[in-house]
Amino acid sequence: MENSKACNLVWFRRDLRVEDNPALLAAANAPGVVLPIFIWCPAEEGEFQPGRHSRWWLKQSLIHLDASLASYGCSLLLQKGNDTLSVLVNIARATGSTQIFCNHLYDPITVARDRRVKQRLLEYGIFVHNFNCDTLHEPWEIYDEQGHAFTTFAGFWNRFLRTRFEPDMPDSSQARLFPYRGNLPTPCSIEELCLEDESEKSSNELLARTWSPGCKHANDALQAFLVGPLNDYTTSRETADNSTSHLSPYLHFGELSIRKLYNCIRSKQRDEEQLFCPRRNAHLFLRAIGLREYSRYISFHFPFTQEQSLLKNFPWRNDEIHFKAWKLGKTGYPLVDAAMRELWSTGWLHCKLRVVTSSFLIKFLQLPWTWGIKYFWDTLLDADLESDILGWKYVSGCLTDGHELDRVLDPHEEGCKLDPKGEYVRRWLPELSRLPNQWIHHPYSAPVSRLQAAGVELGTNYPKPIVDMEVAKYRLSQAVKSMREKNSVEQAARTEEGQDETNPRPNSQHNFPAAFCDQLVPSILTTSASHTQFSGSVTRGKHITSNLP
């Protein structure tokens, strides 16, 4: 009987769960039957196609999602194509569907695609219903007193906390899905999606020993974190070895509800307050959730930053030999090298080690930040464009509340703080395993006799530093000086032409400092034709709807 009813398409993307899935719940509550679909269309991602580790996770997650849907009597229709719009139209025509239910995404590539797809589907008589599944607040719901988007995390987070937000969790356990049983396009098998090739499978088997993708495992990981590592989070997060929540891949693929995580941490926070707990573990982790929210917020209001030069006129060094050494963990700085080898082997890196390694690439080696973010994207299990962009901005001095551009992290000092006993370095750099703690983070300073006793021969079985620390500092200071001089000359020229950057630009409805504009180069402040569709995303109530997917 249900087959004669309307078919409601549920378009899964990075929301691969049944629990707390607003799009799925809305489709279940709408008249008609439900057809869950997933479309693999990597060509549309451009240079940010998922890397090997990320694709492995996606494959396992889709398998688990299909099993979850099967318990409701539905199966997941997998499709592969070069154009999402064509695939959606194909499915709609085969099923007679006129409604698609999906959840918002906020990275600039997807926002642009979703806007185009939604407009074209309307021309075919197909309406798209969008819901919030990935954030606690939509990016267009939080502004400063002047109705402008926040440009510092502190301002954003303080306003967020003042909303006293307590998200509801829709109860999907009572949802009843009437599956579609009619005509379908030829489905793809999980193997036909080609998320991993034969050459990758043996390496990917190692990932399965450490990670268990899927919504059930996501909830298991959350419970394990709540009863264990969270209780020592303020101190354990300061060490390099497996000391964070490890929930980010589950959040990225939408296997774990951000609302559920927030509610759990808020409950822990209230317990801490009632018990007058001196260590504010939940408070600190809640701030980490806030940073994830802020990454979506910044990405939405300042799209396509990943295509821009974050540091205008900065003299990057296009040294591919140094870049290869950085990727392979052969820089001669043990903490950096250990982190890069862990990243390649496991697809994972502690958040503080991400800061250390990315700072080394930008400030020690002065390699283009776009090289670094792309390599992280290719290797991280939890590669997330919004969070990655925010992280690289933070390190490179392109946020008003981030690291200063001329601040250089000393790998030796960071190693002593994050890995005081050298256990992390010894795990990933076995060639240094016999070095005593005194020299483990700077073998280049150790006496020759110590190196010989430990079996270390610098330049042979472990590299000498590819750049001396003092040389790196000097080069960076000169590069910053050169950048600022060129920016000053250009600023003076603009001022003479009556285009003073300290004032709002023509037709601009927001007033950011010139230095901030030059560093972020947000597309909302440019007249570039390819980005004009986003030009109204900052000021509330005037053009914001142009950005809604």
Image (cartoon, grey):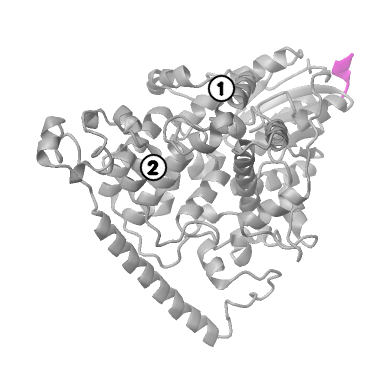
Locate residue 84: give its quadrant.
top right
Q: Nearer the viewer, residue 220 or 385?
A: 220
Left/right placement of residue 523 relative to residue 380 reads right
Q: Nearer the viewer, residue 381 or 97?
A: 381
Mark 2 crowdedness (10 Å alpha carbons): few <14, some 14-19, many ≥20: few
Q: Position of residue 377 (x, y in %)?
A: 47, 40
Work out whether 426 lies above or below 310.
above
In this rendering, the count of numbered labels is: 2
Residue at (46, 39) in percent of width and height: 238
Q: Residue furthest bottom?
A: 496
Disc 1 element: loop
Q: Position of residue 395 (x, y in %)?
A: 46, 53
- Mark 1 = which residue? 213
Residue 75 seen in render: no
Work out whether 242 lies above or below 73.
below
The range drawn in magenta is 1-6
What label sits on residue 417 in the rendered view?
2
Left/right placement of residue 215 relative to residue 469 reads right
Q: Nearer the viewer, residue 183 or 499?
A: 499
Q: Amino acid at mark 2?
A: Lys
Separation of residues labelled 2 and 1 (CA atoms): 32 Å
| Residue 3 in magenta stretch | yes
Q: Amino acid at mark 1?
A: Pro
Residue at (39, 65) in percent of width and height: 314
Disc 2 element: helix
| Residue 77 in magenta stretch | no
Q: Position of residue 164 (x, y in %)?
A: 78, 45
Residue at (65, 75) in percent of width and height: 504
Locate residue 423: give its quadrant.
top left
